[in-house]
Image (cartoon, helix red, strand yellow):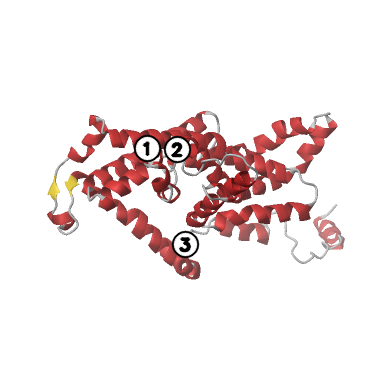
């Protein structure tokens, strides 16, 4: 075949089909891919530009940030009075420095401080054993209710005590269980002996625990109910197909699903474990005495604000905060050892 015939044969070959919109050749990168590449290579905005972009949200959060910075971070500088013979009329700048003298009550065994420490540890143990599991059990009970209307009605009733102040809660318990309360009036009307509950030091710890459970258990179920609602329903269906009973499903599906939030809240509870309810205790201290109603928080108040021993009170408060921090860090480390995230990741 001659060169002219070859050329004419090539000219007779059919032209390539028209490309549709968006089609590309083998050597051409798709436009979308090129755009994606540009988006992936786009540099992150500087922090000041991001702040300007989110200025509305930041302005809304500014009052809350100011409160936290003022009363939680700037106030930490006030711990310096733990090392001073602080006098309010002299101020921090002119008060005498005494070093660790204010901490001597921790090492010399001051009876009042040891009594406050003992009561704090007892109440902390009782609240850890009885108060902390209460919202978990209540959430499991509410979650088992079939009717949503009944569940919502019960939740609304259980949430109400949380919004009452401790002044009202203590007054309610006194009106019901006090010497002239409803319970004793009922017992006396039927010829029975009246019970001394509110002013009885022997049952004071049980009274405190019941007050906390009644007031805060309903509100504390919110987080647990949210976690229960997020557990995959197919897990329950698979367990039911395998023949698991209701208790088995709770043990093998529900509790493992709640475990991360339970561990996180327990760690946070440990950090606040030495603060066992200042307002609740100070309101009932006159009725039962400081023998059982004196804890570290009330000790700081009675010796600092009332007694004027500001340095000693600040020293006790500082040690309490350090112990709480150690408990949080230690519990979080243990959680990491068992494969849980805890409050923060390592």
Instruction: Classify 10 Å Cα crowding around label 2: few (below 14), some (14-19), many (20 and above).
Output: some
Residue 132 spot, x, y in % from top left: 55, 39
Q: Between 328 and 86, which is closer to the camera in this rendering? A: 86
The picture quadrant where one finds residue 143 is: top right
Percent from the top left, x then y, of residue 336?
50, 32
The residue labelled by disc 2 is 201
Q: Give the residue pinned by disc 1.
A: 291
Local packing at callout 3 (Cα closer than 10 Å; few below 14, some 14-19, many 20+) is few
**Residue 304 in the figure: left or right of residue 183:** left
Task: Residue 345: tell me if it is visible.
Answer: no
x%, y% of residue 100?
A: 19, 38
106 in relation to 28, above or below: above
- Give the CA separation, mark 3 to mark 1: 61 Å
Relative to 94, 278 lies left or right = right
Please count the marks in the image: 3
Q: Are marks 1 and 2 in contact (CB under 8 Å)?
A: yes
| Residue in the foreground of this view, choosing between 181 and 55 | 181
Q: Nearer the viewer, mark 3 or mark 1?
A: 1
Residue at numbered disc 3:
45
């Amino acid at each position: 075949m001659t060169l002219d015939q070859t050329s004419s044969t090539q000219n007779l070959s059919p032209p390539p089909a028209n490309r549709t919109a968006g089609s590309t050749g083998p050597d051409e990168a798709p436009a979308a891919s090129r755009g994606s590449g540009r988006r992936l290579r786009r540099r992150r905005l500087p922090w000041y530009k991001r702040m300007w972009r989110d200025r509305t949200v930041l302005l809304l959060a500014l009052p809350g940030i100011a409160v936290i910075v003022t009363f939680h971070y700037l106030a930490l500088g006030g711990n310096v009075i733990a090392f001073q013979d602080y006098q309010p009329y002299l101020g921090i700048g002119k008060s005498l420095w005494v070093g660790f003298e204010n901490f001597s009550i921790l090492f010399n065994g001051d009876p009042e401080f040891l009594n406050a420490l003992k009561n704090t540890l007892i109440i902390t143990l009782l609240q850890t054993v009885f108060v902390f599991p209460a919202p978990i059990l209540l959430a499991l009970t509410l979650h088992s209710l079939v009717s949503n209307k009944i569940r919502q009605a019960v939740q609304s009733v259980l949430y109400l005590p949380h919004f009452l102040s401790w002044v009202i809660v203590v007054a309610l318990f006194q009106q019901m269980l006090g010497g002239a309360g409803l319970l004793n009036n009922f017992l006396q009307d039927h010829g029975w002996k009246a019970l001394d509950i509110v002013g009885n030091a022997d049952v004071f710890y049980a009274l405190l625990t019941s007050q906390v459970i009644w007031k805060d258990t309903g509100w504390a179920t919110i987080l647990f109910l949210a976690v229960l609602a997020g557990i995959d329903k197919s897990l329950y269906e698979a367990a039911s197909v395998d023949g698991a009973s209701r208790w088995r499903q709770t043990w093998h599906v529900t509790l493992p699903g709640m475990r991360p939030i339970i561990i996180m809240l327990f760690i946070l509870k440990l950090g606040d474990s030495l603060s066992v309810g200042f307002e609740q205790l100070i309101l009932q201290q006159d009725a039962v005495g400081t023998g059982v109603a004196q804890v570290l928080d009330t000790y700081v108040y009675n010796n600092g604000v009332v007694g004027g021993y500001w340095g000693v009170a600040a020293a006790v408060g500082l040690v309490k905060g350090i112990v709480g921090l150690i408990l949080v860090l230690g519990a979080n480390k243990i959680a990491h050892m068992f494969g849980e995230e805890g409050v923060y990741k390592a």
